[in-house]
Image (cartoon, rainbow, N blue to C red):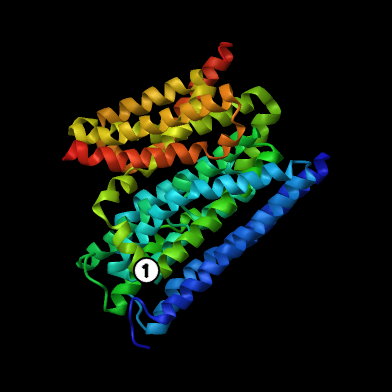
Amino acid sequence: MEFSVNSPFLYAVAAIVIIFVLAQSVFFLVRAYRRGKELGMDAKKLRKVVFSTSIFTIAPAISILLGVVSLSKFLGIPFPWIRMSVIGALTYEVPAAKSAADALGIALENTITDPKVFTTVAWVMTLGIIPSIILPPILMKKIKGGMLKIKNKDQKWGDIFMTSLFLGMISAFLGVVFADLRGGIAGFIPLFVLLVSAALMGVCGLLIKKLGWKWLETYAISISMVGALAFAVFITPVIVG
Amino acid sequence: MNKKTSGNYIEKTDVYGKIWIWTAAVIIMLVPVVICLAYNAWPVATNVLKGLLGVAPLFWTVGVIEVITYTPMLGVGGTYLGFVTGNITSIKAPAALTAMENLGVKADSEEGEVVSTIAIATSSIVTTLIIAIGVALLTVIAPVLNHPALAPAFENILPALFGGLGVVYISKNPKLSIAPLVFMIAIFLIFPSLASAVGVLVPVGIIISLVAGRIMYKKGWI
């Protein structure tokens, strides 16, 4: 078979992987939805979760699509498509591809024509992410058992423990926007974007509470995110020039 | 709903989840194998190792950390699904947290398990479909996505996302938020280069948050 980064064979492999991911997602979605109804949860509210999550996902998903586009020059479309749809993350795939390219002494700007180079990159990108998929089934029992122990021992501390987990994670991603502040005014852009997002969420919260606009709950996170992204598009040329 | 039935659902989710995730692991490993077989092009092992050395130390560490930190937040079904479909930080975890917050359910309750799974499954389906549609229309979409005017938006996805999410959680838990937030801001101001390893710092934030929370709880401040 003649090699091409965009060969029909690679598209077929990608299609199989994508169908598997979709099948797993649909399986879990249907099971959870049915269980929610069994538990007496309002079906309308459950459908609202589906709707609001769909809206919220669009913008970050487009940024992942951009990852496929940026890697397609080097690796073609099917392989980045696979990597971005399974386990992968935008923050991982590009450095992994670059590391493999560096090991081979080639540039990310040129399309791969040698199948051996392609398979080298494919192996590096696959093996580099593999712990993320083999560890959850190995560690699940221990982690869930530990959480249950904490909760059974002291319910209130169990709740604080969970909240602390969320806050620890959120703090890391809030704090990271301060990393570029010392690099000049352009380094303030992520902070401004974060503040605009926070302000928009604050306004949404006020409208929900004061005016009783409950429907806004569905869109609040999407509004704050998309509004902040629009602000980034507007403010960056103004600041950077 | 009695406890036995509730336990059954979670236990079954664990069994199904394990079947799906191990199948996914095999499929993912088979991808490079079938490409090598199809083109009869096996790579030189030392080249793979050299490439792996550039990413494995950081990303394997982040992988371990993510599994330990996100599993309690995402629940059983959400974890098995989220770690197969990926993009946990930028999509799956925020989607699950927002959905649980909007419905007022706790992550460690069965309702939380259900809502988190629905959110993660939905975001996985939507992401997969958007990427598939984008790939199909790539020649039309690529120039738009690559337009320099849009670059700042794609560079700022995380601040745009966590700004809103942060307000929700911080406003509900102001006392608990202070210590991890101050610590994280200080550490990134002092060591900006750590920004590239933010995933490694998530458990540090969690430890600070837990220690501060424990002290405040013992003193009766929260």
Residue B71 location in percent, x, y? 56, 44
Which residue shows up at 50% across the image and 46% down it? A56
Whether residue B111 is visible: yes
Residue reaching furthest bottom?
A: A1
Residue at 43% from the left image edge and 25% from the top image edge: B180
**A127 sits left or right of A152 in the view:** left
In the displayed orientation, state which residue is furthest to the front: A211
In the rendered image of this protein, does residue B171 appear above or below residue B109? above
Circle 1 packing at 10 Å, graded few (<14), some (14-19), many (20+), is many
* Side of A59 relative to B124 (left or right): left
Numbered disc 1: secondary structure: helix
Name the quadrant of the C terminus of chain B: top right
On the question of residue A138 being in view, the answer is no
Protein chain holding label 1: A
Instruction: Return the x and y of residue B35 as percentages of the image width and height.
Output: 41, 77
Instruction: Kindly identify which residue carries mark 1.
Output: A122
Amino acid at the residue labelled 1? Ala
Percent x, y for residue B18? 63, 58
Q: Is residue A73 above or below residue B123?
A: below
Q: Residue at x 52, y 24 (%)?
A: A206
- Please tell me in which quadrant of the rendered image residue A195 appears: top left
